[in-house]
Image (tube, helix red, strand yellow):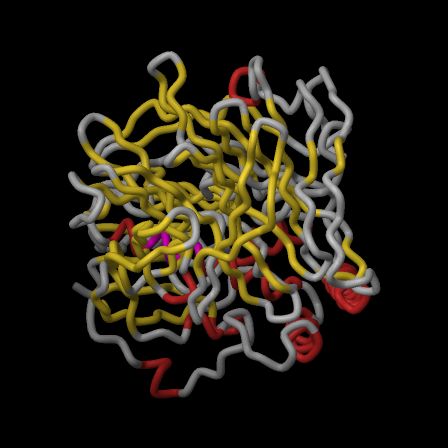
Amino acid sequence: MIIEFRCETEHARRWMGRETLSIDGRDVPVQIAWTATAESRPTGLDMLFELERLVLHKGRHSGADRLKISPERMQARAGTPELIVDFTGAAREPSCSARQYLRPLFNGAAGENAALAAILAGDLPVIEIVDEVDGAVLDRGHPSGEMAAGLSGALETVMARTLTMVAAILSGRPRIVPELARPAQANSVRQPAEYVARGLAVSIAKEIYRLCCYAPHWHVGWRFNDGAGVWQTGDLSGPGWNVLGDPGNHFYADPFPITWQGRTFVFFEDLDHRVGKGIVSAIEFDDAGPIGDVVPVLEEPWHLSYPFLIEDDGALWMIPESSLNGDVALYKCVRFPDKWERHATLLSGLELADATITRHNGLNYLFGAWRDGTAGYSDSLAIYYAKHLSGPWLPHASNPVLIDRASTRPAGNFVTINDKLWRPVQDCAGGYGAALALAEVVELSPTTFRQIVRHSLRPGPAWPGRKLHTLNRCGRLELIDGSRVQPKTRAFGSKFPSVALPARTSPSTAS
């Protein structure tokens, strides 16, 4: 099979300088057909990209940098292609005989200029891959931009996710074309220089903020609720939220509660800002709130977070996020709450964040935010299934089943309400961890998946701050988390008291 990318010679970028495309672990050869430029680019664009490389990317090259094409590369074509992916804005040649002709669209238009226009309007575009032979939309996704620094970083992110979708289509596996939780929004278009200047200003402001404050600084909110909770109301109303006290040089996030052997503990990510690596810690709760001290329960040489807990076969198990180690590992509790032993590796050789399992129609399904080494961490959903918790775990037929920054990344335990399966998801449309959404899973099997986002929850009067990240419940105990400004000058070692936030009855609004 010969795959051909059609790209514009005058605007060749480093991401185009590939000789293969990874499809289901196989490196499939790619040839490039360099074409004449269909549309000019904004004046000084490459100069601005070079400025970003030096300042924003600290000298590192990105996929958006200019690619120097050798004469040999210009002529290197193996033959007539069977599959063409056209990244230009030019019309398809009527005489083209390829059996499949794919065209990426960015907010409905083709070519790099369309992607740049969306970015300059203030947002990453919705990507659609269209088969120009019959006009069918084969895939659709909305990338997240948490890794995108500046205009060049945003363009690199968009093209990286475009290649993810192209590879999934060319694998021959069935694609699930989703209705996205939020369509792209068009804002007033900024000029490239203005966009870069804004990026530089934001970057400088972030560096100043990091010098003065720990960023981000997450904290856990808890409350006892005898009535309808977040899942029933679709907002944060009800009893006031309390903040779990933390030392100023640590943050707490991703709370998971469990009652086991007659005691209730909340497990969470515990990150020491001075080290920059997370471990899993826990604290006990009684009917009045937290008691005793925070106890470290699991540490590895790599970063751990999101301590998902599950009971199975009479034992208690934990699957902490270990995406930086490139695996999904299962730990068994050998002494509750503070002794855990690694039991099995469920998945290896991949970056999968926030693994969360549910049992449905006789199978275990593992959901996680998947990353293929490029672009964002929060926009691609992969699902695996197995009969038993220890595996073997098999990939869903359509992985990644969803690319949507607003409804992909897990945010806590699944729940079943009135025989309907629900999952909390991170809504990263406004940035990583900015909000929560509650999604009803209406189809789930080894070959199907569909969810509908029913509610959106944002920080507001009941939960001040900029973030809302995780949702879990155990009996009367409800837990969320968020972020706050944490100055580095605060006396270390002291613990903040648990702060009660006021109750609220109106739906949440953005702060």
Compared to residue 311, the image places residue 319 above or below, namely below
Which is more toward the observer, 499 or 408? 499
Compared to residue 217, the image places residue 240 above or below, namely above
Q: Please say whether residue 107 is visible from this viewpoint.
A: no
Q: Quadrant of residue 312?
A: top left
Q: Residue at x 64, y 37 (%)?
A: 221
Q: Residue at x 50, y 29 (%)?
A: 473
Which is more toward the observer, 9 or 444? 444
Magenta segment range? 161-166
* Residue 437 rendering spot, x and y as whole percentages: 54, 31
* Residue 269 rendering spot, x and y as whole percentages: 53, 52
Q: Quadrant where the N terminus lies?
A: bottom left
Any magenta on residue 460?
no
Q: Left or right of 84: which side holds 485?
A: right
Which is more toward the observer, 156 or 301? 301
Which is more toward the observer, 167 or 70? 167
Q: Residue at x 56, y 14 (%)?
A: 228
Compared to residue 62, the image places residue 201 above or below, namely above
Q: Left or right of 273: which side holds 197?
A: right
* Residue 88 rendering spot, x and y as whole percentages: 46, 58
